[in-house]
Image (cartoon, helix red, strand yellow):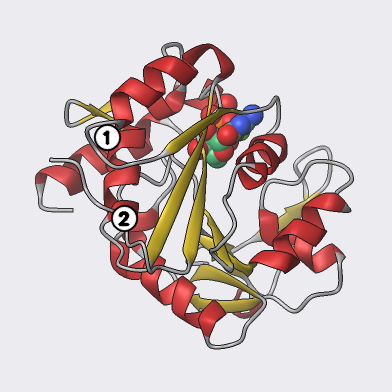
C-alpha cells in the first residue's frame, strides 16, 4: 500500500541513492541491491514515510535509473526522484534543489542505511525543531583506535572516549543546509561536515545500531539477519 506523507509535516528528507556500491562488489547500483527480496532504497523510503513529521521525500537516483526508481517507489510513497551526481555531495545538492517551499527542517539520509527506524528520524527532526541548527545521530566507538603511518606502524593510541561514529539521518534548519551547500568546496562524505566549515555548531543525539550503513558484503548479511528477525 502506498504510504501517505503528512501534508502538515515540517520535514523534507533528501535521500542520496546514486552511488555505485563499489565496496559491495559487482552488481547493480547499491540502492537497488536486494535485501529480503526488495531493494535497499525501498526499505529506506518505507521507513522514512512512516515517520509522522515527514512532508516530502526527494531521492537522488543514479542518472540511468531515474525512471526505474520512480516506478519502483510509486507504490511505496509519494517521492520526487532526481538524477544524482558523481559525488555524494552533488547528489545531495541535486535533491536539495528539488525541495518545494514549505518544510523548514531538512534531513539527509543515506539509502544504504535501509533499516533505520522511523523513531530515529523523529528524534533528529525533534532536536532541530527544538532549536539546534544541525543534528547528527552518533554511536560510541567500540574498538580501540590507533593512528598509523604510511608503513602501518603505530604512531599512537587515540582517546576513544571523545570519538563518535556518525550515522544518518542528519538534520538541519533548511537555511543552514542551503547556505552550507552554496559555499561548499571539495566533496565531503557527510553534510554536517559542510555545516561545520560554516562555523555552525553541530549537536549529537543517540544513534541506532539498526541505522548501520550497508557498505560491504558482511553488512548486507547482517542486515538480512536483522530484517529476518524483525527490523
Ligand atoms: N551516493 C550518492 N551519490 C554518489 C555517491 C553516493 O547519492 N555519487 C549515496 C549512496 O547511494 C549511499 C550514500 O550516498 O546511499 C552513502 O554512500 P556510500 O555508502 O559510499 O555508497 P556508494 O558510494 O554507493 O558505495 P561505494 O563508496 O562503496 O561505491
Ligand atoms: Mg561512496
Residue at the location (29% across, 35% down)?
A: 42
- Residue 140 at x, y = what percent? 50, 72
- Residue 133 at x, y = what percent? 67, 77
The answer to whether 91 is drawn above or below residue 109 in the figure is: above
Sequence-first tag of 1 and 2: 2
- Residue 149 at x, y = what percent? 83, 46
Provide the secondary structure element on which disc 2 rests.
loop
| Circles 1, 2 touching at the beta carbon (< 8 Å) | no
Q: Nearer the viewer, residue 63 or 28?
A: 63
Residue at the location (86% across, 67% down)?
A: 198
- Mark 1: give few (<14), some (14-19) or many (20+) Cα within 10 Å: few
Residue at the location (48% across, 20% down)?
A: 66
Find residue 34 and name its label.
none
Residue under numbered circle 1: 221
Residue under numbered circle 2: 5
Q: Is residue 208 left or right of residue 65?
A: left
Q: Is residue 157 visible?
A: no
Amino acid at each position: 500500500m502506498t504510504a501517505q506523507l503528512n501534508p502538515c509535516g515540517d520535514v523534507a528528507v533528501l535521500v542520496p541513492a546514486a552511488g555505485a556500491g563499489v565496496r559491495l562488489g559487482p552488481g547493480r547500483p547499491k540502492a537497488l541491491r536486494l535485501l529480503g527480496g526488495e531493494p535497499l532504497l525501498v526499505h529506506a523510503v518505507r521507513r522514512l514515510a512512516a515517520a509522522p513529521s515527514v512532508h516530502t521525500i526527494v531521492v537522488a537516483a543514479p542518472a540511468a535509473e531515474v525512471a526505474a526508481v520512480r516506478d519502483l517507489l510509486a507504490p511505496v510513497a509519494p517521492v520526487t526522484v532526481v538524477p544524482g551526481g558523481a559525488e555524494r555531495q552533488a547528489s545531495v545538492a541535486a535533491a536539495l534543489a528539488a525541495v518545494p517551499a514549505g518544510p523548514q527542517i531538512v534531513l539527509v539520509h543515506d539509502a544504504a542505511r535501509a533499516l533505520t527506524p522511523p523513531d530515529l528520524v523523529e528524534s533528529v527532526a525533534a532536536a532541530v525543531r527544538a532549536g539546534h541548527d544541525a543534528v547528527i545521530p552518533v554511536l560510541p566507538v567500540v574498538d580501540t583506535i590507533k593512528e598509523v603511518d604510511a608503513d602501518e606502524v603505530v604512531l599512537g593510541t587515540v582517546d576513544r572516549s571523545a570519538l563518535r561514529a556518525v550515522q544518518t539521518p542528519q538534520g538541519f534548519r533548511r537555511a543552514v543546509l542551503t547556505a552550507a551547500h552554496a559555499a561548499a568546496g571539495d566533496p565531503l562524505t557527510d553534510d554536517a561536515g559542510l555545516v561545520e566549515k560554516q562555523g555552525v555548531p553541530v549537536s549529537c543525539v543517540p544513534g541506532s545500531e539498526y541505522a548501520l550503513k550497508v557498505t560491504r558484503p558482511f553488512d548486507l548479511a547482517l542486515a538480512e539477519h536483522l530484517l529476518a528477525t524483525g527490523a
